[in-house]
Every structure is written in structure tokens, then in C-alpha cells.
Image (cartoon, grey):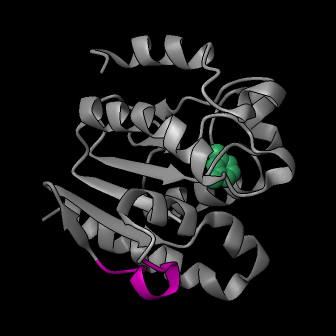
Amino acid sequence: MYETLEEIEYVVKQCNKCKLCKNRTNTVFGVGNPNAKIMFIGEGPGADEDLQGEPFVGKAGKLMNEAFKGLGIKREEVYIANIVKCRPPNNRNPEKDEAIACMDYLRNQVMLIKPEIIVLLGSVALKNILGEEYGITKSRGKWIIKKDIKYMPTFHPAALLRDESKKIYFWNDLKLVLEELNK
Ligand code: URA
């Protein structure tokens, strides 16, 4: 375990623990407030994120930013990261070995940031963080508390792009997060 986010990022930049390192342009470490109370965890970088080295800067990220704006969440006040830090080819889901190889970095980030709340964006984040037995449709919108961290699973923003009817659930789930934070 490393003592600062900068140290982890330095190591991640040179990481070759899994095959995703072969095709990356940039690693996508995470962005935001190192003392954030809310952390968002997505799946893995897409093409835009791979090019820019920042999570959620493509279409899904723009949609997330719009929701943030509407709800009064400042992107720079929260912390945003992914299950894997390198882009899976053709935006496929990260494979189990890739997620496992990358998990220590994310755990270390969580340990240092110490968020009160972690928003799990979609099924890949949910299953890799809380366990394969969870499903996003059933679990979204409900608090799951483990080791002093409150987890809120919700739909992945890319799912909202495919199915607009999911937007309201995403919005409502983030409202629950803000209510919890302001308690
Ligand atoms: N989708 C994700 O899961 N993460 C990103 O950073 C971008 C798109």
C-alpha cells in the first residue's frame, strides 16, 4: 500500500500487471478531490478517456456532468475512478483477471480518500466491489453498508444513453446520496 495518491498514480502509469497495458494510450488513474466525501466508481476508460487520461470525459461523462450540474454536485469536489485503469479493447467489460490485477490500486485510493459514500456506476463496479451475487437492477437505489462505507449502486451513465427511461432512477439515486450526505 502506498501513502499518497501521487505515489499510486506513478506506479499505475508504468503498470503491466495485465494485458490491458498493451493497447493503452494513457492510464486513467482517477480525478477529483483527494478528500472527497463521495467517490464514484465506473467500469473502465473508453476511447476518450484513454486519449485524455481522465475518467468520464466522453459521452457518458458529459451526461454525468449534466446530472451533477442539475443536482449541484461539483465534479472537482467528488472523486471519480474506475475498476480498471486501462481501456478494455472495443469497450468490452473488463475481464475478471484484469479487474483483480487492478483492484489493489483502487483499494489503496479508497483507503487514502476515505469517502463516506461510494456510488457504484453499473453492474461491473457493483459486482467487482460488493460481489457477484449483486445485480444492478435489484440493488440500485438501496444503501449497502460495509466497513463504514455507504455504497449506493446505480445505473452506469452509458446505460442512460441507451435507455432514456433510466435517467430518472439515476437522478433519484444521486438525490438519495445528497440527502445522506446532508444529514
Ligand atoms: N465509462 C466508464 O465506466 N468509465 C469511464 O471513465 C468512462 C466511461
Pick the quarter of the image with the C terminus.
bottom left
* Relative to 7, residue 80 above or below: below
Residue drawn at (75%, 71%) of the image: 161
Q: Tell me where the magenta segment starts and ends, as one range.
A: 134-142
Residue drawn at (60%, 19%) of the image: 15
- Which residue of the protein is positioned furthest toward the right in this rendering? 90
* Relative to 161, residue 96 above or below: above
Q: Would you say residue 50 is visible in this rendering? A: yes
From the top left corner, tell me how far across and down residue 143 is, in percent. Answer: 26, 74
**Residue 36 position by quadrant:** top left
Q: How many marks?
A: 0
Left or right: 64 in relation to 58: left
From the top left corner, tell me how far across and down residue 44 is, in percent. Answer: 64, 47
Left or right: 125 in relation to 117: right
Residue drawn at (70%, 65%) of the image: 158
* Relative to 78, residue 108 above or below: above
Residue drawn at (21%, 51%) of the image: 116
Residue 69 falls inside the magenta stretch: no
Q: Would you say residue 174 is visible in this rendering? A: no
From the top left corner, tell me how far across and down residue 82 is, in percent. Answer: 54, 45
